[in-house]
Amino acid sequence: MRVIIQRVTEASVHIEGLEPETIGRGLMVLVGISRTDNESDADYLANKVTALRVFPDGEGKMNRSVLDIGGELLLVSNFTLYGDTRKGRRPSFDLAAPPDRARQLYDYFVASCRKLCPCVKTGVFQAHMSVHLENDGPVTLICDSNQS
């Protein structure tokens, strides 16, 4: 499982026909799921995302988590995180989990994050979404459960 984490002052995801999901200060998280991922990968990354110290403390050092600051999470599924561009000019998505399995693990990841963080918003799995964010820092990190 792979996530791209961006520290944001605000973020939103827009899906045609629905009200946008919006957060204030917190983390925008793109979530990719591979064929080999399982619930332990989701639990590992839920704990990592919510405890990662990427917000400044009183001295300006990245020493506080999204939980410490009372921040919010915006989780958006993104199978393209497992796009392989090493060969040719068109990405291969062979490493990405099939949609049914990916949806199950994405939902599990969302539920795991909700157990840890009081404010979690999401996109819609397999929908075409437009993501808007104001990256704070900018701070952008990649975490992968298979490289821990």
Image (cartoon, helix red, strand yellow):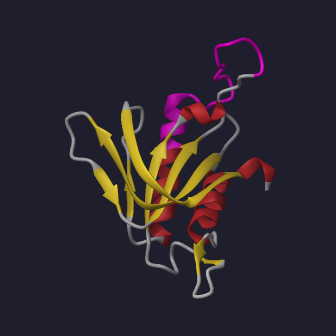
- Residue in view at x 47 percent, y 60 percent: 8
Front residue of 110 and 77: 77
- Relative image position of residue 133 (x, y in whole percent): 42, 51
Instruction: Please tell me whether residue 23 is drawn above or below residue 76 in the rendered image.
Output: below
- Residue in view at x 21 percent, y 41 percent: 18
Secondary structure, magenta segment, majority class: loop
- Residue in view at x 72 percent, y 52 percent: 145
Q: Quadrant of the N terminus?
A: top right
Q: Is residue 85 left or right of residue 99?
A: right
- Relative image position of residue 38 (x, y in whole percent): 65, 47
Q: Which residues are magenta?
A: 86-104
- Residue in view at x 63 percent, y 30 percent: 96
Instruction: Please tell me whether residue 132 is drawn above or below residue 48 in the rendered image.
Output: above
User: Can residue 25 be found in the magenta stretch?
Assistant: no
Front residue of 33 and 62: 62
User: Can residue 93 be found in the magenta stretch?
Assistant: yes
Q: Is residue 103 left or right of residue 86?
A: left
Q: Is residue 67 left or right of residue 144?
A: left
Q: Quadrant of the C terminus?
A: bottom right
Q: Residue furthest top?
A: 88
Q: Quadrant of residue 123?
A: top left
